[in-house]
Image: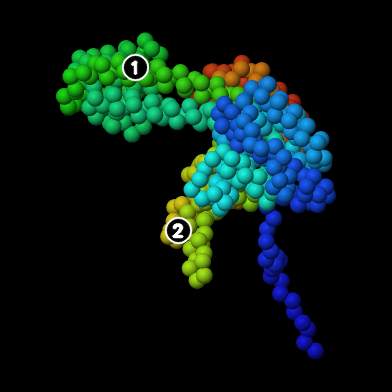
Amino acid sequence: MATKTHSTTRRRNRKPYRIGKPRGSIRARVQAVGPQRFGIVSVDCAKARSKWMLANFYDDVIIPPTVVEHHRAGLDAAIAAVQQAATEHDLADMLVAVERTGRYHGPVRRAFAAAGFETRIVHPFTTKQYRKAADPGVKTDDNDLAAIHRAAVTGYALSEQTLGESWQRLRLLVRHRRDLVRKVSALCCQIKDHLDAAMPGYASGFAKFWATPAPLAVALAFGSPAAIVTAGVGGMAKRLRDRQIRFQHRTFRRIVDWANNAAQPQPDGPWHVEIAKALNEDREHKRQEILDLERRIAAILAPTPYVLLLSIPGINVVGAAEFAGEAGPIRHYANARCITGRAGLFPSRHQSDEVDHPNGPLVKCANHRLRFAILQAADCLATSNRHFRHLASTWRCSGADPRLIRVRVASRFCRIAFAMVAGRQIFAHPAMRDRHYIVDKLLKFHIEHKTPMSQILADLKGVAAQIPQREHAAEAIPIQRQLSAAPKRRGGVKRLGEILPHVLASLGVGQIEYTPSGKHDPT
């Protein structure tokens, strides 16, 4: 008799189609107390004042639309009126639905939450759709309040996850840093534009104009092709030595060759140079602010599990902090698809009858800051990570759209990041074949940023608490190598010698035997 074979292919359990419930559903609570005893406070916020009303689940208005000023007396009066109405009408349960309006809804929401009310948020798009259905072409505060009430009844008044103080500070700092970086980029463009007026074609002669300070220092010091020709290589070298700026003589020879063949500058060239100097001072000030912010960001990132992402080649401290600040605590996500779903990393779709366009552009309604952080990490992986660089090259050769390649890398990064952060582990993945060492990478970051030793030790102690115990010995190997080589170094010997033993002690690892290569040390 023939034996019956079973397919070993795993099939996905397809759930039957059903109408999904809005995540803010209050049906069970309404059934428990009764629709007439369930109150909904709707709030339409503005900058200086808001309008609110109280009605029950059956749309019976208890307190008509009322204006409340955004100060303590006005908010206290509104809360007292709601509490008195709840007592008089025997309301057993209640929630406050506040429409999100920039930051204007914050004072009202915090006041009701402090008074013990459950506060929920209604998205402005939701209010718009519910208002247009009932009052097309007529937008008033009263109509908005009715729309907010209908949204709360149907479950579209949503609760938001609260963030701790450290997470709020991290998110604020990474956003402030990102804003400063954009401002510095704008200043760089302005500086090059003014220099091109005074020294035509000078900046375009350098492939990486901002990589070293010497080209800009020469331009701001001399300001014209004639002055450069008069000073020559010796004059430029002396000026930069006086300012303690490193340079190479071949750079000066290239500048002199350009000056001998430069086009005639504009008559107001000296004024453009003065403006460029002022803009460069602003740029230097902002760059120092960015360095200070990055040190503070690293201090917040170190004691969080997101620091484990530093073991991924291509992810640095700033990239991990950007993702951590926008994503928030990993406990807010059930799986990696929740992260990509919140970031809107899936295509929009339009289907009607036989017409189906399933692969449209990325959906517009998403957390765009989180999407930016994820796509920024994907760009770094596609260029600096061997595994993802090979994947991107393979997809590119197969004719895939560059935007699709970027999203694919971003989705894989989210899956890896969720497994590492939620599981508190160094993830075993082809991308980790030559993984980076977390402590070593963070230590190099702080040395480059000239961080005070007290903060370095505090950050490394926080990192050691996040790294799995089984990885401590591996993390200590590069530190031991640096400690063995520290006496042979000319610069920073004392500082490294003081820090590294503390790092090894934090990892709980003693002196590891390290065999030198045997090569002659040139120093």
Type of the residue with mark 2: Ala
| Image x and y of residue 410, in percent | 55, 48
Q: Quadrant of residue 421?
A: top right
Is 105 displayed left or right of 224 in the figure? right
Look at mark 2 in the image and give the residue it sits on: 400
Q: Secondary structure at mark 2?
A: loop
Q: Nearer the viewer, residue 516 or 414?
A: 414
Q: Residue at x 78, y 47 (%)?
A: 36
Is 181 displayed left or right of 221 in the figure? right
Q: Quadrant of residue 172?
A: top right
Q: Residue at x 65, y 30 (%)?
A: 108
Label 1 to label 2: alpha-carbon separation: 46 Å
For the residues labelled 1 and 2, say whether their Cβ atoms are less than 8 Å apart: no
- Mark 1 and mark 2 lie on one chain; the one further toward the N terminus is 1
Look at mark 1 in the image and give the residue it sits on: 277
Q: Nearer the viewer, residue 456 or 119?
A: 119
Quadrant of image for the N terminus: bottom right
Q: Residue at x 47, y 22 (%)?
A: 287
| Image x and y of residue 502, in percent | 71, 23
Q: Nearer the viewer, residue 158 or 340?
A: 158
User: Mark 2: few, some, or many residues within 10 Å (few <14, many ≥20)?
Assistant: few
Q: Nearer the viewer, residue 484 or 27?
A: 27
Q: Secondary structure at mark 1?
A: helix
